[in-house]
Amino acid sequence: MGKIYSGFLACSSGASSRSLAFKRGSNERVVLVSKGERSAEDFAIQRGGCAATVLGGIMTNWQSRQSFLGQECANTLRDGRVGIVGLGGGGSHVAQQLAHIGVEHFVLCDPDEYEDKNHNRTVGGTPADADAKTPKVRIAQRLVRAINPKSTVSALKHRWQNGLPFLRGCDVIFGCVDSYTERDQLERLSRRFSIPYIDIGMDVSKAECGYAVHGQVVLSLPGSLCMHCFNFLRPELLEMEAREYNHAGGRPQVIWPNGILASTAVGLFMQLIAPWHKNVNVGSVMYDYDGNRHTMVVSPRVAALSSMVCTHFEDVEGEGDPFWNAGDGVTSMMRAVEKWCSERRST
Ligand SMILES: [Zn+2]
């Protein structure tokens, strides 16, 4: 059996019945399982196969058209908790799709309020929201609950760094942010707590004959290649962004590339928890999106790095400790949760 990372349980909230067991190595899969059923028998991951029998599930009529994902998938989706950081053009798409699929528990983080300029791309936003300056997390929360009234949504109108106690209890985190720095931090958080991280982003740049629309989707799995390995995050980019921080303007964003990127990200999420065919990648992966040619392909870097082992998080992976000081954003609740987690880890 593969190693089960204790960090998942150390930081999950007490009464919740969800946890994520991560197993690494060839022919192993990541599955979401119920904490209450966390015996070795539950991890019936078939070598070379694709299905992981986790729990008996109750599939609703609503989900009957996705029955190929397996009977247990409904429970897995219902009991899991997904974090989405950034509820703009990309994150709003992700939230909507996850709610339709059957995810019921969400942690949403975004400090921004809805404005006129967001109306070209944010799913669920209305002119009334622009007038009222509705927080983006509230729009996403409303969208999710309209799709599934049983959903529980922690809508955090804060910088995500202030929502660490919530995020580290998530089973998967989606990063839909603009900056390289935030991507780097989110990946570090995910590695610390052995949480699969899925990152999406798009950009528009000047090209010879007009503009180039492009983007990427990265699935970064604990124990596998990271965004630094893929050379997507590079020290010079992080340094340049830090230098130009005060001059950063809003990046061009439009709805259709964000929809494609978000759909690919949700597809990777589903492949992770309910693989429906045998020929799947078992490690981290990066996709390159070319919005001018309308193509999404696996980055050539993935094959080029197939024999490489990530060394960027050797010292911190699975540690589960806070890795930066959230400064003034540290709340008594965060301290209490951290204390609780520390105690759990030491027992
Ligand atoms: Zn790496």
Image (cartoon, rainbow, N blue to C red):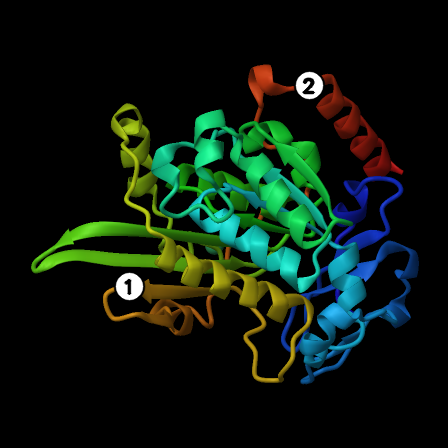
**Residue that appears at 70% across and 33% down:** 165
Name the front one of labels 1 and 2: 1
Task: Tell me if the residue at label 1 has its CB under 8 Å from ligand 1.
Answer: no
Q: Quadrant of residue 238?
A: top left
Residue 316 shows up from this direction: no
Residue 33 shows up from this direction: yes
Label 2 environment density (alpha carbons within 10 Å; few <14, some 14–19, many ≥20)? few
The quarter of the picture where the N terminus appears is bottom right
Residue 255 against residue 329 in the figure, above or below: below
Label annotation for residue 291: 1
x%, y% of residue 131?
44, 27
Foreground pick, 95 / 18: 95
**Residues at marks 1 and 2, CA–CA distance in whole angstroms:** 42 Å
Residue 164 against residue 87 in the figure, above or below: above
Looking at the rendered structure, the kind of residue marked 1 is: Gly
Residue 119 lies left or right of residue 111; in this view the side is left
Q: Secondary structure beneath disc 2?
A: loop
Label annotation for residue 331: 2
Callout 1 touching callout 2 (CB < 8 Å)? no
